[in-house]
Image: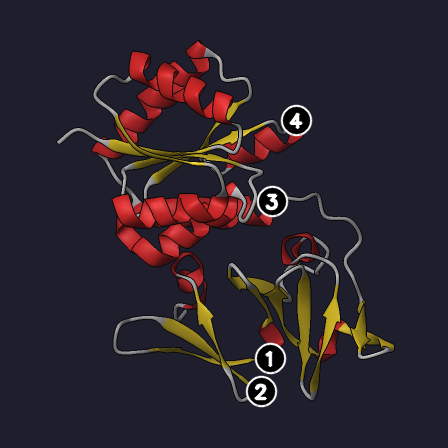
Amino acid sequence: MNPRAVIAEDEPLLAENLRAQLAECWPELKIAAIAPNGLEALAAIEREQPEVAFLDIKMPGMSGLEVAAESVDRLGDAAPACVFVTAYDEFALKAFDLAAADYLLKPVAKDRLDRAVARLRERLARPDPAGIAAQLRMLLGSSAIAGEPLRQIRASVGDTVRLIPLEEVCYFQASDKYTTVITRDGEALIRTALRDLAAQLPRGSFQQVHRSTIVNLAEVAAAVKDESGRLSLKLKNRKETLPVSRIYAELFKPM
């Protein structure tokens, strides 16, 4: 069976140009869908279950990295091999190379696309779902340049602004345009997006466990699997449990 692909690009001309270039250099590849934003891209991937996804990094709704991470979480081994299409500078591109995930720099050059197609053909011949998950974890962790780690959070509770020491935070939860800070005894809101917050947190103390959740590892009491094999975290000082995406599940395997 010929391989299939989804293209996610919010610029129609760029999407059509990529489709035409792929038709020339990879004629047996069928384009199953072209999505103009991240949410539609994720829906198309879940519906079509293609072997390959060409994902623009910056899209409305969800970024290409978020779409890739969520597709692994929802589809597991059936998640597509992802090629990220980006206008990032050379520093960021090195991060993609280090993670061994392919990328295309806008505007897409024919020789570069030819090399990407060659890599994809080889990858499809020898699939490695665990490798895809590891690459996505690295990419999500390197999507911003970290500065000095935060020591406290300035957050809103009603009409009051609180300074919350990081050690009092149980976890962070993405909430629309805001991030909810959940402590042992309450909640507060900050305007920083979860993806931007992740780069400012001290490494080794906080871990992203889901597209919308970062947990304080000191607050984790146990990791529990349900009957379907899905992993969740029990916390020391909160009653709720936190779901763990498949791409992060191996971080909580027993030593």
Q: Is residue 2 above or below residue 24?
A: below
Q: Which residue is mark 2?
A: 238
Q: Which residue is mark 1?
A: 219
Q: Nearer the viewer, mark 3 or mark 4?
A: 4
Q: Which residue is mark 4?
A: 89
If you read the primary sequence from the N terminus, does the residue marked by circle 4 or circle 2 appear first? 4
Dot 3 falls on a residue whose secondary structure is loop
In three-dimensional space, the C-alpha distance between marks 3 and 1, rounded to whole angstroms, equals 24 Å
Q: Answer with the quarter of the image where residue 54 lies.
A: top left
In three-dimensional space, the C-alpha distance between marks 1 and 4, rounded to whole angstroms, equals 37 Å
Do labels 1 and 2 touch, CB within 8 Å? yes
Q: At label 1, which amino acid type do we have? A: Glu
Q: Nearer the viewer, mark 1 or mark 4?
A: 4
In three-dimensional space, the C-alpha distance between marks 3 and 2, rounded to whole angstroms, equals 29 Å
Q: Is residue 4 above or below residue 74?
A: above
Q: In which quadrant of the rendered image does the N terminus lie?
A: top left
Q: Answer with the quarter of the image where residue 205 lies.
A: bottom right
131 vs 49, left or right, is right
If you read the primary sequence from the N terminus, does the residue marked by circle 3 or circle 2 appear first? 3
At label 2, counting other C-alpha atoms closer than 10 Å, the crowd grade (few under 14, some 14-19, many 20 or more) is some
On residue 142, which mark appears?
3
Q: At label 3, which amino acid type do we have? A: Ser
242 vs 183, left or right, is left
Dot 4 falls on a residue whose secondary structure is loop
